[in-house]
Image: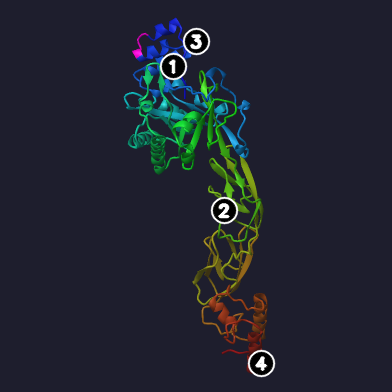
Amino acid sequence: MKFVKTAAVLAAALMAVQYLPGFVVNHIAEAETANSQDAEIVDAMITGYEGNADDPETFKVITSDSQPVSTAVASAANLVHNSKFDDCAKVDGIDVSFYNGDIDWKTVKASGIDYAIIRIGYRGYAGGLLATDTKFYQNIKGANEAGVKVGAYFFTQALTVQEAIEEAKYCISRVQDYDVTMPIYFDVEKTEGAGVNGRLNKASLTIKQRTAIAEAFCQTLQDAGYDSGIYSSKSYFLEYLDPDYLATKYKIWLAHYTTETSYKGDYQMWQYTSSGYVDGISGKTDMNILYSKKVNFADDNVTITDAETPVKPALVGDGILTFESSDPSVAAVDANGNISGISSGTTVVTAFSDNGSRDTITVTVDLPPVSVLNYTGMLFKQIGASEVISRSGVQLTSSDASIVSVSEDGTAVATGCGMASITASDGQGNTAVCNVLVTNSEPLPGDCNLDGVVNAIDAVYILNLAASLGTDNDARLLSDDYVNLYDFNADGSVNSFDANDVLVSSALAGVGYTG
């Protein structure tokens, strides 16, 4: 935004503006002092007129709380920041309008500028009509293409809540097809000069009325999904608005041309000069510092013990965040910062903010052994029968495909009578074996080797299985038919009692129990 300074104009400049409307000539002719910027100011008026003499930005006023343009600080290196921003990243940016001419946005980006607040337009200071900045579309398109983050502002002359809402909707209609990730600001200032007194200046509104107008603009934008805020100078905030109330709901953009602002209220961005120089822009431009909270995890470590439920560590920080895991095979992190355990181990997740800050958290994944097979023992009582025995992504191998075959989708198919085993691996170190029995008839309970006789050999099979199940006789990974085959006494458990009963039965039968 350009603050036009009242100044004497060289004779050549007066001749250059002889065709401008009378109020512009009067404004120039009544200036009191001359300096090297006079020609610049007149050029801006000539260029900016072109039917837009009602543009309030042409007659912005330098207020007493700002240094003269010629002495305003032009380098962020000279700034003294309020201590409340010690934990914030200080991000360099600019704000522009058609007064900045044609901008080389790729060069601007390469010079270290992260964002630009682009003027959408204005309401005429006399007629009250809405107008679009003649460089708006060129600027926002160029900034988007160059990767410069974009916010916007509208120079208001709204006298009522209804007019403020109209301005907000006007802004939405202009930005809706573009990438606007920063706030859209309500630019409210004095517009006056020799022979010029803006409609807002003459309205004699109360602080309450002015604040309500600003709130209506911002809330309309927020209701439409855009971030919003208010721009003004230190003195205007303090004299004409209720900034403490507005700061509880919207972003505050402070204009104060000094190396160390004395403004005590809340603000997130500080316009500290209009005399900055940026590669890619001819002439001087407004410079800003955005105070953006550095990204920070609340904890240094997190442990994941459940692969089914993602963990999202507490995190603070402004800007657009991205995440990265140093070892995605241990834990993966999505675009929203949700961390999912994949396999036991340790990895480091880093959160990056586009304000240049980053923070890390150490993630320990301690998952219980993963069952890669639905069963460790199963019985097919018919050739051709099939069963899904593993989850996706598990590699299966059959010891004898003529008895049981396996497919890539985790299905086992009975292909012939006999005994075989299926070995499974998920590539994460988890392996398992499933013993498979296939018969084409109803087997005898206890005939664990399917030889048609229940004898001491079967008792050995039962004891081996009971030992593998443990003292709790946990048979949840055995198919029902498989359990029934081993559970000789039909008490619901596979244990030494079944082996004992098999031995007794086979002894009584002589050569073995055959049913």
Instruction: Reply yes or no: does residue 327 show up in magenta.
Output: no
Say few, some or many: other residues with alpha carbon within 10 Å of mark 4 (under 14 / 14 to 19 / 20 or more). Answer: some
Is residue 146 shown to the viewer in this render?
no
Say few, some or many: other residues with alpha carbon within 10 Å of mark 2 (under 14 / 14 to 19 / 20 or more). Answer: some
Q: Main secondary structure of the magenta part?
A: loop
Residue 335 picture location, percent across and down: 53, 47
Kindly give the residue lying farthest to the bottom in the view shown. 508
Q: At numbered mark 3, what does the secondary structure look like: helix, strand or loop? A: loop
Task: Please state which amino acid type lies under the numbered disc 4.
Answer: Ala
Instruction: Report how far apart the C-alphas of labels 3 and 1 lie in the structure.
Output: 16 Å
Residue extent of the magenta highlight: 18-22
Instruction: Report how far apart the C-alphas of labels 2 and 1 lie in the structure.
Output: 52 Å
Viewer-nearest residue: 265 or 463 = 265
Q: Is residue 2 above or below residue 398?
A: above
Instruction: Report how far apart the C-alphas of labels 2 and 4 lie in the structure.
Output: 63 Å
Residue 319 picture location, percent across and down: 54, 40
Tell me which numbered mark, 3 or 2, is placed earlier along the sequence.
3
Q: Quadrant of residue 158?
A: top left
Task: Please state which amino acid type lies under the numbered disc 1.
Answer: Ala
Residue with the mark numbered 2: 312
Residue with the mark numbered 3: 34
Viewer-nearest residue: 68 or 511 = 68
Task: Please state which amino acid type lies under the numbered disc 2.
Answer: Lys
Residue with the mark numbered 4: 507
Tell me which numbered mark, 2 or 1, is placed earlier along the sequence.
1
Say few, some or many: other residues with alpha carbon within 10 Å of mark 3 (under 14 / 14 to 19 / 20 or more). Answer: few
Instruction: Report how far apart the C-alphas of labels 3 and 2 lie in the structure.
Output: 61 Å
Task: Please state which amino acid type lies under the numbered disc 3.
Answer: Ala
Residue with the mark numbered 1: 44
Is residue 291 shown to the viewer in this render?
yes
At 59% across and 43% down in the image, what residue appears?
295
